[in-house]
Amino acid sequence: MIATEKKVFARTPVLFPQITHYCPGCGHGIVHRLVAEALEHYGVQQRAVCVAPVGCSVLAYKYIAVDAVEAAHGRAPAVATGLKRARPDLFVFTYQGDGDLAAIGTAEIIHAANRGENISVVFVNNAVYGMTGGQMAPTTLLGQKTTTTPQGRSEVNEGPPVKVCELLASMDAPSYVARVTVNKPAAVRKARQAIITAFGRQVSGKGFSLVEVLSPCPTYWRLPPPKAMEAVENWMMKTFPLGVFKNKEAADAKIAQS
Amino acid sequence: MSKPNRVLMSGNDAVVEGAIRGGVDCYFGYPITPQNEVIAGMAARLPPLGKVFLQSESELAAISMVHGAAAAGKRAMTTSSSPGISLMQEGISYLAGSRLPAVIVNVQRGGPGLGNIAPAQGDYFQATRGGGNGDYQTIVLAPDSAQELMDFTAQAFDLAEQYRTPVLILSDGRLGQMMEPVELRDPPRRPPVPKPWALTGADGRPQQVVCSLHLPIPELAAHNRVLQAVYREIERREQRAESYHTSGAKLVFVAYGACARLCREAVDYLRKEGLAAGMLRPITLWPFPKKKLQTAVQSAAVLVVVEMSAGQMIEDVRLSVGDKLPIEFVGRTGGEAPTVKELIQFGRRLLKKYATSRRGRRR
């Protein structure tokens, strides 16, 4: 018996049919797809502008088929602010790594979040500087060896890793702040949902949202890709727990019910 | 002719007026003295006009917000003063590399470092040599009155869009803070240019990317050739200067901005005494008005460069006239400026010296 064929997956046209430059086992490719699918979900790809960062995903616009502007290192939320204020009808999102967002761009992300800027931020945290060759990131874990922490990151010398979601969730303005990962299919499905929720906040004019995606970097974690996927869970998630850290809509709904 | 609509306003307020007349869409800025009247004026006047005003968290963010708004094809500007302009160099380099128009006003103050909040002209090198990383130039306009601050700010948007480059207006604490009559007028404008490069969403057209990144070597080399071709065109077409009594002048002051006002007064006094003094005032500092200076000094025996700096524009004067003429320098730093009296006395002495020298007679 031959069952009728059922289409269970189609490639989103919001991604260019192109092989990425990312290392084998890198999470960026998956996150790019989720972003593209979320854009398609709302049908905003024709009025979307991606603000590309400096870092491994500097060439994100080679893969995500929407208009794009490339910001200086860390300034993506400020560039996005300028764009969105100038053209509120555009769908504006930044795509940033941990060095870009949580080190050199700390001021820009904090203040964009605090203004409740109606933009969406996709924050890919892989706990290391990839493009420059494996240096310590603000999110590098304690004990993690990098080229600039050859003995491992120490709490005394470098301080503990920066927890962006926890930090932003302490502010009044952000609408949605969540941490997800892409280390296995179930996690990818949850990550997709989180990005869709985040983008929805902008579409409905609810303001700032950020989704942090824990992403493996097999190259600079010095692990084979499957081991890196496991390390996200066994190692990274101990410092960076998954979850929704801020959800204004849910909070508003609760207040309305009470 | 109708009566000119004249009002008393500060140079900083004139920038706000000029920006509105020039069609500014978005202003982003961060407080710093002595330009605070500009950011306050923008905050008061832009939102009622339906235009964007936003105070940023830093100058780095302000210029990046300009970057975003400019990428969307809007008329975007920021203002600051010297230390803040230093922070903006990152963004200005990106704007130049991304070929985005923008207007930036520097109300210069004393430096280096935090310096002080007094007027100075110590940012000439930074302004006229690109200022940030890489091979690029920005057009630099040097107004010398509140009127020109208004007119040039309005016109700067057209210039920026025509050449797709940031335009800097080099003001200073003295020009910014002083008050004088300004005629509220719409200065001559250039025809609007289409902006096919603007990011509007890839609706019915292929994806568009505004970037300064070109990883392949031949690609970046080609991009730089395009930039350089634009700069050569600007040099050919946009050199501007004011010649003040330079015809037949034995002594020619060369000064811009606030210093030009002092020199103009000194020239008037010296000419009343029958002495052949004149002034060449560069209006564009980049492109430097080389030809206009060369013409202005044809009868001169000596040049006097006057700056509120340790000597920056004097290098462009030397590059323009070579060693054909003696070039004297009067410079003050830290917020000081030469007095008109000093300039007159110095002018008298030099005219006496060079009127009898062989060099003076040769001309």
Image (cartoon, rainbow, N blue to C red):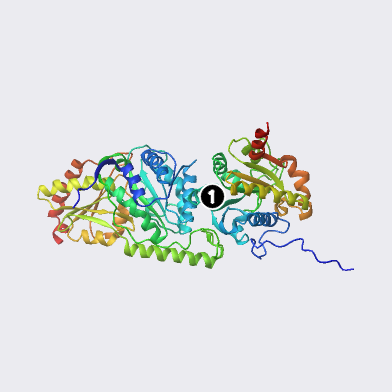
> Is A42 left, or right, of B246 in this rendering?
right
Relative vertical location of residue A74 with respect to residue A250 in this rendering, above or below: below
Q: Does residue B261 appear anywhere in the picture?
A: yes
The residue closer to the viewer here, A99 or A75, is: A75
Q: Does residue A147 appear anywhere in the picture?
A: no
- Farthest right residue in view: A1
- Farthest front residue in view: A257
The residue closer to the viewer here, A138 or B141, is: B141
* Percent of width and height locating residue A241: 73, 40
Number of numbered markers: 1
Location of mark 1 (residue): A80
How dense is the environment of label 1, judged by Cα within 10 Å: few (below 14), some, or many (20 and up)? many
> Is B271 left, or right, of A22 in this rendering?
left
> Is B209 left, or right, of B40 in this rendering?
right
* Percent of width and height locating residue B129: 39, 54
- SS under mark 1: helix
* Percent of width and height locating residue A98: 63, 47
Query: Residue at horizontal 40%, vertical 64%?
Result: B230
* Percent of width and height locating residue A252: 64, 36
The residue closer to the viewer here, B112 or A111, is: A111
Relative vertical location of residue B216 with respect to residue A202 in this rendering, above or below: below
- Kind of residue indicated by mark 1: Ala
Query: Residue at horizontal 25%, vertical 59%?
Result: B293
Q: Could you tell me which quadrant the C terminus of chain B lies in?
A: bottom left
Mark 1 belongs to chain: A
> Is A118 left, or right, of A246 in this rendering?
left
